[in-house]
Image (cartoon, grey):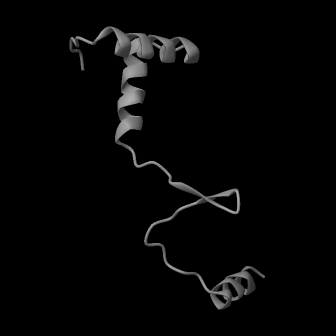
Amino acid sequence: MRTTVKLDAEASEIIQLYADSRAISVSKAISELVLQAVQPKMRIKYIDGIPVFDIPQGRTITDEEVRRLVAEEI
């Protein structure tokens, strides 16, 4: 799709730096940045100084389930 977009100076500079750093066109850079902006971000929390993924509303996996799955692989 072809379109014309007016950007403020700061946004234009950011896009150009992004494009240059990846050796891609400005159009490709805009597409990548827009897609990144709408994708959910992986949340990270720190437990005792160690970064871990913060998975919201995840299902708890029991030791029993792990043992059963390991046994199935054998």
Which image quadrant is residue 49 in? bottom right
Q: Residue at x 37, y 26 (%)?
A: 31
Q: Is residue 16 above or below residue 34?
A: above
> The N terminus lies in which quarter of the figure?
top left
Q: Residue at x 70, y 63 (%)?
A: 48
Which image quadrant is residue 10 in? top left
| In the image: residue 54, left or right of residue 56 | right
| In the image: residue 56, left or right of residue 53 | left
How many numbered dots are placed on residues in this image?
0
> The C terminus lies in which quarter of the figure?
bottom right
- Give 67 or 63, whichever is nearer the viewer: 63
Q: Residue furthest bottom?
A: 64
Measuring from the top left, give residue 54's x and y in whole percent.
Answer: 53, 62
| In the image: residue 6, left or right of residue 60 | left
Q: Residue at x 44, y 16 (%)?
A: 14
Q: Is residue 63 above or below residue 40?
A: below
Measuring from the top left, give residue 32's x and y in whole percent.
Answer: 42, 28
Q: Residue at x 45, y 67 (%)?
A: 56
Measuring from the top left, give residue 26's x and y in whole percent.
Answer: 41, 13
Measuring from the top left, give residue 55's x and y in whole percent.
Answer: 50, 65
Q: Residue furthest right?
A: 74
